[in-house]
Image (cartoon, grey):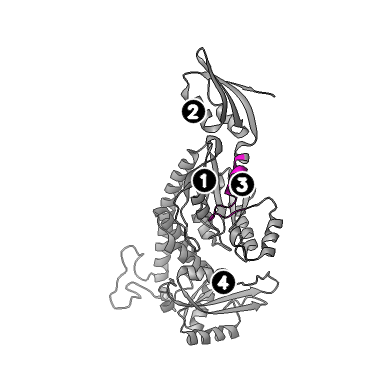
Amino acid sequence: MEKFRENIAVSRERAILVGAILKGEAENDDELAELIALTESAGAIIVDRVQQQITHINPSTYIGKGKVEMIKQRVKKQKADVVIFDNDLSPGQIRVLEELMEVKVVDRGELILYIFASRAQTKQAKLQVELAQLEYTYPRLTRMWSHLDTVTGAAGGPSAGAVGAIGTRGTGEKQLEIDRRLVGKRITELKREIEDIDKRIVREIEGRRGQFKICLVGYTNAGKSTLMNALTDADVYVADRLFATLDTRTRQWTLDGGRKALISDTVGFVKNLPHQLVASFKATLEEAITADLLLHVVDVSSADAQNQAENAKKVLADIKCGDKQTIVLLNKADIVRSRAHFELLQTIYPDAICISAKTGMNLDMLKEKVIEIYTGGMLLLRVTASAGDGKIQNYLKSNSNVIKQEYIDSSVIMEVSLGKRQLSELQRFKPIKIETITD
């Protein structure tokens, strides 16, 4: 068994994909489409695919024994290195499947974790991915690796006189117990390190209080990073692959009238994202949690766009963002493959804006909508302050349309058009006199 589990990496390996659908579950045109994209993103070579509708889950092998034997024959014929399931398997099921098929078996959760590990660049992302991997692995230590049943120490070591390693509880400790203790210790260390980073990130986010914050969310590879580049010239890394972006990036977006907003790009969502990843990337998703506005980017060129949008909404609900004000953006509208499918999406999301982040189509319309929400409606105000108070004057020039400005004695009087949302910020400046101008 252990020879198949030495490395879960699938890069450049020949893979057979397997998908099992319980009868009664909703079916898509191509149930394996996302697994294909995930596998290709991981760098594996797909040599065969197998789909099966099942009436129940086999507790030992998930799929039927006959289908297991058929896959085994295909493994030999295609000289496959790995079988990848589009399902989450138990440790026992993986162990039995590997013994029967005589090849490495990887489930959906493991594949996603591997992709995240290969994409992580910053210290924060690497720590988060390692934590997710260990938390995924920890409960599986009891059954997945057969070598963990060996006993170390003088009483059961491989040779006479063998002694337990430093840090073990002494002679006769099972390798399983050592591995579980080491993994548990590392999980504790990682949580402590991530908690320190989380506190710093939260402080940074709190430091932006008073600024209008926008967060890009959506399914992976929907075009969020391309959109951020188009709006802010952020030069964020863009690639046509899943999970190209793992680290949150925040840039300033200059709106009309001198108004500025902060816009953040977040990690993309995916169907059945392992909960360990959602938990460990909580700080990364903090931008969405504290945002004033979400821009939900949907890839309308995908045949599975509707399901992808719904799955993204589920993740948002999981992180308590389901009720946050959101603009749905039907992206890649310039390369729609199915007009009927596109019109269905427009019916489901009647207030959505059709855009193309790549060509810039309708980005001006998006900006107008954001400004409308940003301002919350406009007010005509007469603001009187000390002529020497540069902070108030700079704030109004940056956040409003100045209609008139005059100096009388030691005061400055400014007539401005200001958004309702910004009024509370303006009121924090003292001494100051604010009057509403009526027509």
Q: Which residue is mark 2?
A: 394
Instruction: Inspect the magenta stretch and tell me whether residue 426 lies in it.
Output: no
Q: Is residue 410 visible?
A: yes
- The magenta stretch is 354-371
Crowd tier of the residue under label 4, counting other residues whose Cα lies within 10 Å: few below 14, some 14–19, many 20 or above: many
The residue wearing badge 4 is 86
Let me know if residue 174 appears in the view. Answer: no
Q: Secondary structure at mark 1?
A: strand
Amino acid under disc 2: Asn
Q: Earlier in the sequence, mark 2 or mark 1?
A: 1
The amino acid marked with disc number 3 is Met
Q: Nearer the viewer, mark 2 or mark 4?
A: 2
The amino acid at mark 4 is Asp
- Contact flag, marks 2 and 4 (Cβ < 8 Å): no
Please state which of the two labelled residues, at mark 2 or mark 1, is closer to the viewer.
2
Q: CA distance from mark 1 to mark 3?
A: 17 Å
Going from the N terminus, do you reach mark 3 or mark 4 first? 4
- Residue 365 circle label: 3
Residue 267 pos. (x, y %): 51, 55
Type of the residue with mark 1: Ile
Discs 1, 4 touching: Cβ within 8 Å: no
Q: Residue at x 50, y 25 (%)?
A: 393
Specify few, some or many for label 2: CA neighbours under 10 Å numbering under 14, 14-19, or 20 or more. Answer: few
Identity of the residue drawn at 53% across and 28% down: 396
Q: Earlier in the sequence, mark 1 or mark 4?
A: 4
SS at mark 2?
helix
Determine if the magenta segment contains residue 368.
yes
